[in-house]
Image (cartoon, rainbow, N blue to C red):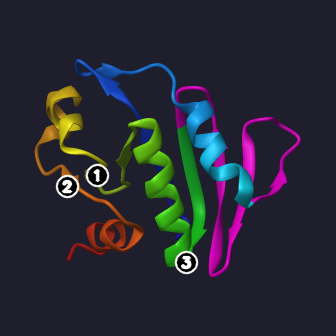
Amino acid sequence: MSYDVFFQGFKGGEAALGGGGTVRAVLEPYVARPGPEHSFLRIDVEDGGADAYLSDDHMMVNHAGGRSTWDLLVRAAAAANWTILLPDGSTAVTNENQRAELPPELVTGAVLVSSGTELLRVVAGL
C-alpha cells in the first residue's frame, strides 16, 4: 500500500508524548536500512516491508506490503500504546482503554485490532 498510515498515542484527547523508543525497539530487528536521517527506517520482513518515519512521539508508514509487515506494525503500536490512523479517516485502537483518550472526532467508528490481518480487514472495509 502506498498511502500514508499514522501511528500516534493520545491522552485526554490530545497527542501524547513518547513511545518512539518502544516502537524502535520492536522494529529494530527488522530494520534493513536506516536512512541518512535518523527518523527513516526501511523495514523488511519475510513477505514484504515498509518505509517508516519514526519520531519520539509518532510514526508515519508508507509503501507497506505483506501481512507480516502489518502484524509487526500492530505489535509495535500496541507496545507503545499508540493508535493507528488510516487514510480513510478510520482509527484502529490496539487496546480498549485507548478509546477514552481519543479526541472526540476519532472515537466514532474506532475499531479494536490485535493483528495485521484485522487491520487489513479495516483497510479493506470488511
- Asked if the residue at tag 3 contacts the one at tag 1, i.e. Cβ–Cβ closer than 8 Å, the answer is no
Amino acid on which the number 3 mark rests in the picture: Gly
Please state if 72 lies on the left or on the right of 34 as rendered: left
10 Å neighbourhood of mark 2: few (<14), some, or many (≥20)?
some
Prevailing SS of the magenta stretch: strand
The C terminus: image quadrant: bottom left
The magenta segment is: 31-58
Query: Residue 113 is drawn in which quadrant?
Result: bottom left
Q: Amino acid at mark 2?
A: Val
The reply to whether the C-beta atoms of the residues labelled 1 and 2 are less than 8 Å apart is yes
- Relative to residue 111, is residue 88 drawn left or right? right
- Rounded to the nearest whole Å, what is the CA distance between mark 1 and mark 3? 18 Å
Closer to the camera in the image, 102 or 87? 102
SS for tag 1? strand
Q: Is residue 86 magenta?
A: no
For marks 2 and 3 on the same chain, the one whose residue lies earlier in the sequence:
3
* Residue bearing the label numbered 3: 66
Q: Which residue, as the protein is rendered here, is positioned at the far left? A: 108
Indicate whether 73 appears above or below 24: below
**Do tag 2 and tag 3 residues touch (Cβ < 8 Å)?**
no
Point out the tag, 1 or 2, that comes first from the N-terminus: 1
Task: Give the x, y percent position of residue 27.
Answer: 64, 51
Instruction: Kindly identify which residue carries mark 2.
Output: 111
Location of residue 98 in the rendering, given as x and y in whole percent from the top left corner: 24, 36
Q: Which mark is residue 92?
A: 1
Q: Position of residue 77 (x, y in %)?
A: 45, 46
Residue 35 lies, with reference to residue 43, above or below; the image says: above
Tell me the SS state at disc 2.
strand
x, y percentage for residue 15?
Answer: 37, 22
- Residue under the point 55% across and 78% down: 66
